[in-house]
Image (cartoon, rainbow, N blue to C red):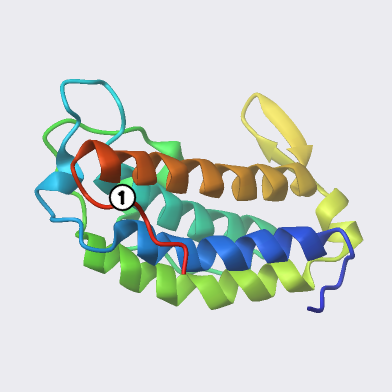
């Protein structure tokens, strides 16, 4: 594995793992089940899956501003929008296609990120932090959301996610 910054080696290993887990955790889930919340306020599978896709598009563009691609669900997820009641989100199949579209682009952005770029401060209204913090949070959040979807699988009566 090659990376412009040695800091990215572990990140890229996790990225590659999670790239493969995403389609596995969504495998076989019916669209109607993707919206079930089981009388809770928890985010449903459709929102979790879409927010993961959106995050890859958003963070790729933050690290490399030449990345201008948008996810199919951008209007629903841009600017970290939360779950919306009564909204039909893109299908899990659409999310999967977007995942396949952004994954190689974002991986290249991560692999090419230099220490200088990773140390650059990202400014948001009311907060600022190094790009490195955004990258590490993104990798953590991907694992977290995949885990939430894996739990939903079991709660909805689906078999456990297959790791291979």
Q: Position of residue 61 (x, y in %)?
A: 59, 61
| Residue sitting at the far top | 40
Secondary structure under tag 1 reads: helix
**Residue sitting at x 60%, y 68%:** 16
Q: Position of residue 58 (x, y in %)?
A: 52, 55
Q: Is 149 on the left or on the right of 46, as rendered?
A: right
Q: Is 57 on the left or on the right of 12, as rendered?
A: left
Q: Is residue 25 above or below residue 83?
A: below
**Residue sitting at x 89%, y 64%:** 6
Work out whether residue 61 or residue 31 is closer to the camera in this orientation and state it. 31
Query: In which quarter of the view is residue 72 placed?
Result: bottom left
**Residue sitting at x 37%, y 65%:** 23
**Residue sitting at x 87%, y 49%:** 119
Work out whether residue 46 or residue 153 is closer to the camera in this orientation and state it. 153
Image quarter of the N terminus: bottom right
Disc 1: which residue = 75
Q: Is 115 on the left or on the right of 107, as rendered?
A: right
Instruction: Residue 88: tell me if it is visible.
Output: no
Q: Is residue 11 above or below residue 133?
A: below
Q: Position of residue 27 (x, y in %)?
A: 28, 63
Q: Position of residue 82 (x, y in %)?
A: 35, 32
Q: Is 124 on the left or on the right of 19, as rendered?
A: right
């Amino acid at each position: 594995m090659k990376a412009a910054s040695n800091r990215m080696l572990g990140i890229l290993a996790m990225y590659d793992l999670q790239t493969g887990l995403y389609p596995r955790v969504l495998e076989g889930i019916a669209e109607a089940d993707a919206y079930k919340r089981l009388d809770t306020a928890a985010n449903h599978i459709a929102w979790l899956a879409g927010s993961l896709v959106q995050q890859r598009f958003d963070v790729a563009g933050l690290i490399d501003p030449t990345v201008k691609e948008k996810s199919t669900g951008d209007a629903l997820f841009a600017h970290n929008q939360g779950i919306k009641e009564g909204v039909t989100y893109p299908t899990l199949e659409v999310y999967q296609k977007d995942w396949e579209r952004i994954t190689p682009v974002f991986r290249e952005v991560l692999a090419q990120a230099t220490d200088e770029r990773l140390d650059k401060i990202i400014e948001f209204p009311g907060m600022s932090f190094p790009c490195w913090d955004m990258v590490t949070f993104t990798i953590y959040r991907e694992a977290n959301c995949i885990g939430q979807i894996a739990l939903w699988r079991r709660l909805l009566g689906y078999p456990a996610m297959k790791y291979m």
